[in-house]
Amino acid sequence: MNNTQLLGQVSIFQELPAETIADLAKRVWHKQAEAGSVIVSQEDAGDALFVIAKGKVKIVLYGENGREIILSIMKAGDFFGEMSLLDRQPRSANVVALEDSELLCLDREAFQTHLAAHPTTALGILAEMSRRLRHADEVIGNLALLDVYARVARIICNSPRSRESRWTEAS
């Protein structure tokens, strides 16, 4: 799959016209990451958006005692790094390759040049950031307002398998 095809499948770029995606595709560069390697470290300067072309990565935080908290597992077609790309703040988490992975990278300068010519790209990124923020708000609310039994029940009810089961029963 070429860069244009892959970028066209990424949620933040799916609604863009073909010529806009083609412009993005010519601005990306490739990065290889071996399984177990750190792709970005928390507190590193954020200067690029990454799209996973092949492989799988985990987004993690490490506690002072070395405890690892996995925030997300991402696969081909997923992306990360958009926050630092936009706000110039350090990375908010660590990203570690779970498998040998290939990434498409779009640095801040190339992204800003692209946005100047194709400002509608920003709308896709804003929509995805809003979706992620809403999800984070929901998780925080659940942690603060629900006891452990209610949290487990909500997770079970909202799991893809549970939704599929309810759909089958209703049919």
Image (cartoon, rainbow, N blue to C red):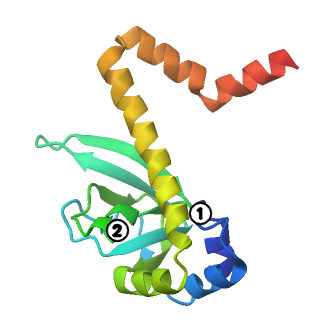
Element type where label 1 sits in the image: loop
- Look at the picture and state if 66 lies above or below 168: below
| Residue lying at the far left of the rendered structure | 64
Badge 1 amino acid: Gly
Badge 2 amino acid: Leu
Give how far across and how far down residue 7 sits, in percent. Answer: 61, 73
Q: Which residue is drawn at 35% across and 60% down?
A: 96
Q: Residue at x 16, y 44 (%)?
A: 66
Give how far across and how far down residue 123 sits, in percent. Answer: 53, 64
Image quadrant in which the C terminus is located: top right
Local crowd size for mark 1, using a 10 Å CA cut-off: few (<14), some (14–19), many (≥20):
some
- Look at the picture and state if 20 lies above or below 130: below
Viewer-proximal residue among 115 and 27:
115
Gap between marks 2 and 1 measured at Cα: 20 Å
Element type where label 2 sits in the image: helix
Viewer-proximal residue among 106 and 18:
18
Tell me, for residue 77, which label it has, or none: 1
Give how far across and how far down residue 128 sits, in percent. Answer: 51, 54
Identify residue for label 2: 86
Viewer-proximal residue among 164 and 142:
142
Q: Which residue is drawn at 83% across and 16% down?
A: 170
Q: Which of marks 2 and 1 is in front?
A: 2
Residue 30 visible in rendering: no
Tell me, for residue 64, which label it has, or none: none
Local crowd size for mark 2, using a 10 Å CA cut-off: few (<14), some (14–19), many (≥20):
some
